[in-house]
Amino acid sequence: MKLVPALALALVCTVGACHSVSGALRTLPPDQAKVAFERLKSLDGRWAGQARHGGDPFPVEVSYHVTAGGSAVEEKLFVGTEHEMVTMYHMDGDHLMLTHYCVAGNQPSMVARCDPNMDVLKFTFSHATNMKSEDEMHMHSGSIRFVDADHIEAVWSGMSGGKPEGDAVFVVARVR
C-alpha cells in the first residue's frame, strides 16, 4: 500500500487547531479545508468495489465529477440503480461542506471537521431540508479515508428517532 500523498498529509490537524476547550471537534481550519477540497477533486472518475449496510457485502459503483467551474464535486453512489444518490461537496466561505441528496427524500448538509485520528476527512451534521425534525431518518455523519491515490474507504452513518441507524461502508478503487 502506498503512503498517502503529501497533499493529503496537509489535512492533518494539530490538537490545538482541532479541539475546542470542551473537547468537541472544530471545523477544519480554512487552509486545511481548501486542501481537503482539492483532495476531493482528485477523486474525479469512476470507482468500483464493495459496500455493506448490515448483511453481506455487495458490488457498488461510485463516481466523482468536478463541476461548476471547479467549485463543486458531485459524488454518485449506486450509479445507475434505483437507489442512486448524489452528494455535492463545496466550499462555503472557509468551510468545506456537503449536501447529500438521499433516496429517503431529505437533504442533510454536513461540515468537515478535524478527526482525532488525523487520517480521515470527517463530516458531521449541520442542518437539513425536507425534514420536520432531526428525529426523522437521515444521514448524520460520514468519513472518507484516503488510503492512497486509487483507494478510498467511506463510512456514512444514519440516525432515526435520535438513535444511530447503522453504517453504510464503501471500500472502492479507481477504475482504470
Image (cartoon, rainbow, N blue to C red):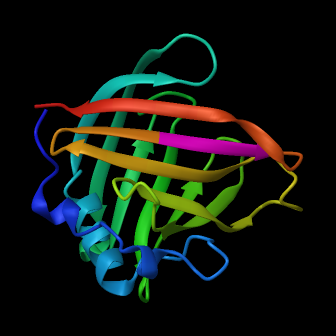
Left/right placement of residue 102 relative to residue 92 reads right
Q: Does the magenta segment cover residue 156?
A: yes
- The quadrant of the rendering that contains the C terminus is top left
Residue in front for this viewpoint, 166 or 131? 166
- Judged by its main secondary structure, the magenta piece is strand
Residue in front for this viewpoint, 169 or 21? 21
Left/right placement of residue 155 relative to residue 153 reads right
In the rendered image, the residue lying farthest to the top is 56
- The quadrant of the rendering that contains the N terminus is top left
Above-or-below relation of 46 to 25: above
x, y (%) of residue 167?
Answer: 61, 34
Q: Does the magenta segment cover residue 64?
A: no
- Which residue occupies 48% across, 14% down? 57
In the rendered image, the residue lying farthest to the bottom is 93
Residue in front for this viewpoint, 64 or 13? 13
Above-or-below relation of 103 to 122: above
Above-or-below relation of 117 to 164: below
- Which residue occupies 69% across, 43% down? 158
- Which residue occupies 53% across, 75% down? 19
Residue range highlighted in magenta: 155-159
x, y (%) of residue 140?
Answer: 67, 53
Residue 166 in view in this figure? yes
- Which residue occupies 31% across, 76% down? 32
x, y (%) of residue 73?
Answer: 34, 62
x, y (%) of residue 143?
Answer: 47, 50
